[in-house]
Amino acid sequence: MPAFTATAPGKIILFGEHAVVYGQPAIAVPVLEVQARAIVNARPGGQGINLIAPDIEISGGLEDLALDDAIALVIRLTLEELGISQPPACTLVISSSIPVAAGLGSGAAVSVAIIRALAGFLGHPLPDEAVNRLAFEVEKLHHGTPSGIDNTVVTYRKPVYFIKDQPIQTFDIPIPFTIVIGDTGVVSPTVKAVSQVRASYKAQPDLFQNYFNTCGMIAQNARFQLSDRRNPSLGPLMDDNHAVLQKMGVSSPELDTLVEAAREAGALGAKLSGGGQGGNMIALVEADQAEAVAAALQDAGAVRTIITTVR
């Protein structure tokens, strides 16, 4: 069997994080500058699936992983989907340039890359719908009660207007725009922030439902502005969305510092992106200001920045 390679991009949420778990719309886009990669090679004379993932210090057989390990789960789900109980001996090499627990969809990207590489190697490439469904099952390990937005954006590699339990809406960007991503360097598993918001919602349902509704209206407005080619109008909407997320308690001093630094450096708007409490923030910028805003973020403490064109 020939080797098979698959990649999957990162992602950022432009609008609607956390509220999307409660039925409100969210907008997310792929980040092609970072990606996960999975390569499957035949291993003649061997047995089973051997795993090499130096980024997370995995080297050994599939049977060595815990049953609730995300990589073990995605492999088992893929084999079950294909109806294969005894796969041919092979080596699966996994790598990723996507920061972990930073709101960039690293878990979903690794899952999608593995599913596609393994299915392709076994001669049964899966359609996007199946890849998305399997990756969503793995997301439950990462997020507890996932919205499904990460796996959807990563699978389809297109901007997505997402409402939980409704048909997927991918869309095109009429006019590309530039986003600078700033990483606080603070590791923040999404499941922790999601659980905190759920607890706060149960304690203050009316207040948090109002927050969710406001985020939903912001996302709806942003979708309209994008389709109407009014990209600069996204900036104030980002600022409004960040203010609501602060009230939800999912921002952090590091995120707020970077958001303010981006605005002071000329960004059209800025907000946290993803689960919050660390991880990444994003800033909408004019293309010729991207480097200056990235430098300002680094001066303000960002451990890395990524400049991406959304198209």
Image: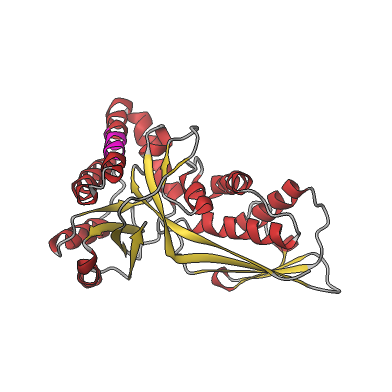
- The C terminus sits in image quarter: bottom left
Extreme-top residue of the structure:
206
For the point 50% across and 40% down, the residue is 145
From this view, report whether residue 162 is shown above or below residue 286.
above
Q: Is residue 258 left or right of residue 67?
A: left
Return the residue nearer the eye: 166 or 95. Answer: 166
For the point 45% across and 52% down, the residue is 158
Return the residue nearer the eye: 83 or 259. Answer: 83
Q: Position of residue 161 (x, y in %)?
A: 40, 41
- Residue 272 lies within the magenta run: no
From this view, report whether residue 258 is shown above or below residue 16.
below
Return the residue nearer the eye: 222 or 36. Answer: 222
Q: Is residue 297 among the parts visible in the rendering?
A: no
Highlighted range, magenta: 214-221
Q: Is residue 97 among the parts visible in the rendering?
A: yes
Q: Main secondary structure of the magenta part?
A: helix
Q: Is residue 137 left or right of residue 310?
A: right
